[in-house]
C-alpha cells in the first residue's frame, strides 16, 4: 500500500469533511450549540453532546506543535515516501491537526515553524490535507 | 475521598510464573503456553485449578475459562493494551475485598517473534478514527511516541542524550538478569549512533519484540497467609485513560498516570519517597521518563537530569525496571504482566543478582496503547501493611 491508494471510510459524520477535500477545501466541524470546533469530525460534540454542526472552512494556517521525521515507512506509507514528516499542526482556529509536512527538506523545518495548507491527491478523487512551510 | 472504602491489604499476589528466553523465542505458544504459566503460578502458590474462581485475560476470559474447564464467578477482559494486567490486579483486588471472588488467575502469552517465523499471528487493530486521521499520514506506534518525545523536548528542553540514559540504566539492570534478551553494556553513544526510524527516537530508544508469557495468582489476605510464599499485598491501585489515539491526547507531555499514580499512592497510604522499586512500563525511553514525572517522583521536566546521572540504574536512588524492562528484557506486545512479576520477585527477595537490599514497597505502573491508558498498582510486603 502507498499513501496514494488511501481512501477514507465515509460515515454520515465524516462525509462533509471528505467530500470537501475533493475540491481541496479543509472544513472543520463546529458545534452549533457551544460554537466549539471539533476535530476529528464525529457524531456528537465531545463537550456538550450536541449533534448539530456547521462546517467552517479553515484558513489553512498554523504552526508546528510537534514533529517526527520518519526514515522507515509505517501504516499507509511505503519506502519510496521516506523520509517523510508527520506533525501536529496548531491551526489558527485553535484545532490541533495531524498531517504530513511536505515540500521541504526535513532538516530545514522545525517545531514552531509557520505552515500553510496544501494537498496530496489520494484514491477516488479525495485529497489529503498536508502542510508546507509558509512563505517568508 | 473521605469515608472511602479501601482495598488496602485485602488481597495479595501469591503465585507468579513467567516464560521468557534470552533468545527471545519460546517453543510453546497460544493456549499451551498459557496453560504452562498458569500451572507454574498455581504451583508457586501451592494452589490448584480447583481453587480458582476468577479469571482475567485480555482477549477472552470466556474462552480461557472454557479451555481450563472452570466456572469462574469473576471474569475480566477489558482491553487497555499493555496496562491491562495492572488494571486486572486492581479489579481483582477490589472484587476480593468485597467478597465477589477469592482466587483469581491473570494470564498473558504472546509470541510475535516466533509467529513471524511461522507466518502465523499478526496484530489486528480495531477499526476506528485512527484509520482515517492517523494511518494515511504514515503514523504508527513508534511515531506516536516520537511526537510525544519531540513535544517534551520543546517544552522542557529534554535532550536525546537524556532519553538515551533511560535505556543505558535499564541495560545495566538487564546485564544482571540471565533471561534478558540484551545484556551487553550500553552507552549513551551507542543509543545515539543507532538508526533513527522516527525522530527524535533512535532504534535503541524502542522496546524489544520477543515471545513471552506470564501468570499471576491473587487471593484474599486471609487465604494468602496459609500459602507457600510470603504474600505480596496490594496496598493501592488506580487507573485512568484520557484518549486512545495520540491525535486525541489532551497534552502530549502529560499522561493519565498523573491521575492514576497519585490516586494509587493515596489509596495505599504511601508517599513516593517510600517506594523501593518502580516498575514503569518502558515501551520507549520517553514512556518511562513520563512515568517518573507523572507519578509524582519528579516535577515535570526534572526527571531527565536524575536519569542522566544514573538515578534509576543499579546503585541509584530509585531503581527502575530491575528485570531489564521492555527495552532489554522482554516485550511481547502487552508487557504489563512482567512489571508485576518482577515487583513480586523483588519483594519476596527472589531476584538473584539484581536483588535490591531493601524491597518493601514496589510500584507496577502499566501504560497502554498510545500513552492512553494508565494503571498503577502499589505492592508491599507484610512489613508495610
Image: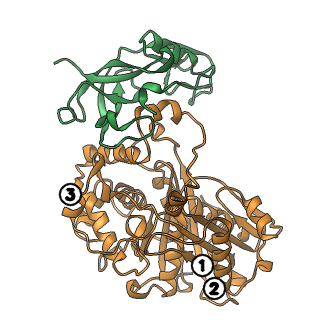
Q: Kindly identify which residue carries mark 3.
A: B193
Mark sitting earlier along the chain (1/2): 1
Q: Secondary structure at mark 2?
A: helix
Query: Residue B44, labelled with which disc?
Result: 2
* Residue B134 in view here: no
At x 44%, y 50%, the residue is B255
Where residue B196 appears, as percent x and y from the top left, is 27, 49
Horizontal side, residue B291 vs residue B367: left or right: left
The image quadrant that residue B13 belongs to is bottom right
Q: Quadrant of the N terminus of chain B?
A: bottom right
- Crowdedness near tag 1: few (<14), some (14–19) or many (≥20) residues, C-alpha within 10 Å: many
Horizontal side, residue B190 vs residue A19: left or right: left
The chain letter for the residue carrying disc 2 is: B
In the rendered image, residues at marks 3 and 2 fall on the same chain: yes
Q: Secondary structure at mark 1?
A: strand
The image quadrant that residue B118 belongs to is bottom right
Query: Residue B222, labelled with which disc?
Result: none
The chain letter for the residue carrying disc 3 is: B
- Rendering colour (chain A): green
Give me the C-alpha separation between circle 1 and circle 3: 38 Å
- Evaluate if marks 1 and 2 touch, with contact meaning CB atoms under 8 Å apart: yes
Amino acid at each position: 500500500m502507498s499513501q496514494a491508494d488511501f481512501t477514507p471510510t465515509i460515515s454520515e459524520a465524516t462525509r462533509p469533511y471528505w467530500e470537501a477535500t475533493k475540491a481541496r477545501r479543509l472544513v472543520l466541524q463546529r458545534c452549533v450549540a457551544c460554537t466549539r470546533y471539533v476535530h476529528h469530525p464525529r457524531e456528537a460534540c465531545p463537550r456538550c453532546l450536541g449533534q448539530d454542526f456547521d462546517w467552517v472552512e479553515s484558513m489553512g494556517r498554523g504552526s508546528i506543535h510537534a514533529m517526527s521525521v520518519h526514515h522507515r515507512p509505517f501504516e499507509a506509507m511505503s519506502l519510496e515516501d521516506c523520509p517523510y514528516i508527520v506533525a501536529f499542526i496548531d491551526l489558527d482556529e485553535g484545532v490541533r491537526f495531524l498531517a504530513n509536512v511536505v515540500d521541504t527538506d526535513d532538516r530545514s523545518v522545525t517545531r514552531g515553524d509557520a505552515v500553510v495548507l496544501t494537498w496530496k491527491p489520494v484514491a477516488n478523487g479525495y485529497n489529503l490535507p498536508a502542510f508546507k512551510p509558509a512563505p517568508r | 475521598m473521605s469515608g472511602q472504602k479501601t482495598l488496602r491489604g485485602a488481597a495479595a499476589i501469591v503465585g507468579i510464573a513467567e516464560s521468557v528466553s534470552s533468545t527471545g523465542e519460546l517453543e510453546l505458544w497460544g493456549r499451551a503456553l498459557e496453560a504452562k504459566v498458569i500451572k507454574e503460578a498455581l504451583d508457586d502458590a501451592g494452589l490448584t485449578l480447583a481453587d480458582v474462581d476468577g479469571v482475567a485475560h485480555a482477549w477472552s476470559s470466556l474462552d480461557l475459562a472454557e479451555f481450563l474447564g472452570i466456572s469462574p464467578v469473576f471474569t475480566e477482559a477489558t482491553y487497555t493494551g499493555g496496562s491491562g494486567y495492572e488494571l486486572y490486579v486492581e479489579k481483582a483486588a477490589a472484587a476480593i475485598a468485597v467478597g465477589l471472588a477469592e482466587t483469581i488467575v491473570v494470564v498473558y502469552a504472546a509470541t510475535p517473534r516466533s509467529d513471524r517465523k511461522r507466518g502465523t499471528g499478526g496484530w489486528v487493530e480495531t477499526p476506528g478514527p485512527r484509520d482515517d486521521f492517523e494511518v494515511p499520514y504514515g503514523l504508527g506506534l513508534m511515531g506516536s511516541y516520537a511526537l510525544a518525545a519531540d513535544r517534551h523536548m520543546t517544552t522542557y528542553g529534554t535532550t536525546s542524550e537524556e532519553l538515551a540514559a533511560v535505556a543505558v540504566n535499564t541495560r545495566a539492570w538487564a546485564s544482571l538478569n540471565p533471561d534478558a534478551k540484551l545484556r551487553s553494556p550500553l552507552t549513551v553513544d551507542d543509543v545515539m549512533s543507532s538508526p533513527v526510524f522516527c525522530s527524535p527516537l533512535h532504534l535503541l530508544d524502542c522496546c524489544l519484540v520477543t515471545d513471552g508469557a506470564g501468570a499471576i495468582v491473587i487471593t484474599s489476605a486471609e487465604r494468602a497467609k496459609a500459602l507457600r510464599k510470603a504474600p505480596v499485598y496490594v496496598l493501592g491501585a488506580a487507573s485512568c485513560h484520557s484518549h486512545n489515539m495520540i491525535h486525541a491526547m489532551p497534552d502530549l507531555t502529560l499522561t493519565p498516570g498523573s491521575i492514576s499514580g497519585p490516586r494509587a499512592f493515596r489509596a495505599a497510604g504511601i508517599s513516593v519517597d517510600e517506594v523501593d522499586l518502580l516498575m514503569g512500563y518502558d515501551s520507549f525511553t520517553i514512556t518511562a521518563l513520563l512515568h517518573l514525572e507523572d507519578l509524582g517522583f519528579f516535577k515535570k521536566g526534572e526527571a531527565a537530569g536524575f536519569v542522566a546521572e544514573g538515578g534509576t540504574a543499579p546503585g541509584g536512588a530509585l531503581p527502575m525496571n530491575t528485570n531489564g524492562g521492555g527495552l532489554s528484557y522482554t516485550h511481547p506486545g502487552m508487557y504489563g504482566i512482567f512489571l508485576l512479576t518482577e515487583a513480586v520477585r523483588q519483594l519476596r527477595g527472589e531476584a538473584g543478582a539484581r536483588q535490591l537490599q531493601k524491597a518493601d514497597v514496589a510500584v507496577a505502573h502499566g501504560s497502554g496503547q498510545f500513552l492512553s491508558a494508565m494503571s498503577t498498582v502499589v505492592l508491599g510486603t507484610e512489613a508495610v501493611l
